[in-house]
Image: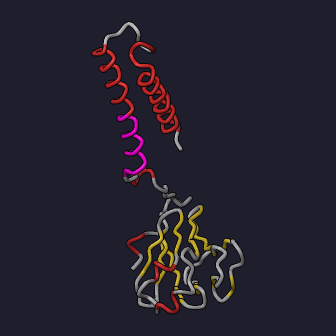
Amino acid sequence: MSKGNILSIIAIIILVVIVISMWILGATGVFAGLDNKSFDIILAVLLAIIAGLAIELIYRRFSPKSKALQTTMTHCPDGTDSFAKLVLPNNNNIIVNGAERILGREDFLGVISTDKLLFIGKEHFKIIKESGCFYIQDLNTKNGTMLNGEPLKGFEKVKLEDGDTIMVAKSLTIKYNERSHISQIE
């Protein structure tokens, strides 16, 4: 929760306490010197402030997040951008060009049969980009991930090389390709 959200919640609580005390004690308790019209105006202003803060909180919570606030892409140390692609058995590609990409069952719908798809975890493995290099990490799944025939253990992170073969849950074979510029990935 951000600092702004916490301050808004505190302000709402304080205003609610004030309004409730005004309502319970009435004009004679809290604002003894005011007539009923002034009391109604103060009450209306306080309720408007509470409604405004509540709307602001709801808007912040449910509004779509800006793409600029999402994962930042990094540049390679040598100044070239590297991109990776995963070539699926049906010759479709998954492009990986962010800091990390988690892949799982939903990414392979229509690629393999539903029976084999059930062996793949919802979040099965991830591809991570660090310092211009790509790494693969199994997310400690039941059926595991293999790289070039070798199983990835636990949350072990292994560097990927162009041409590597990834075996997901002994059900799906993926070819890994890497290029220094996206236009070279086909």
Q: What residue appears at the point 49 percent right and 36 percent down from the top-left corner?
A: 9
Q: x, y (%) of residue 109?
A: 43, 84
Q: x, y (%) of residue 130?
A: 59, 63
Q: Is residue 103 magenta?
A: no
Q: Is residue 59 magenta?
A: yes
Among all residues in the image, which is located at the extreme top?
33
Is the residue 32 above or below the residue 22 in the image?
A: above
Among all residues in the image, which is located at the extreme left?
37
Is the residue 151 above or below the residue 81 in the image?
A: below
Is the residue 174 above or below the residue 37 in the image?
A: below
Q: Quadrant of the C terminus?
A: bottom left
Q: Which residues are magenta?
A: 51-63
Quarter of the image where one finds residue 22: top left
Q: x, y (%) of residue 178?
A: 51, 75
87 on left or right of 128: left
Q: What residue appears at the point 44 percent right and 77 percent down from the top-left corner?
A: 94
Asked whether the viewer can see residue 134, the reply is yes
Q: What residue appears at the point 63 percent right and 73 percent down from the top-left corner?
A: 139
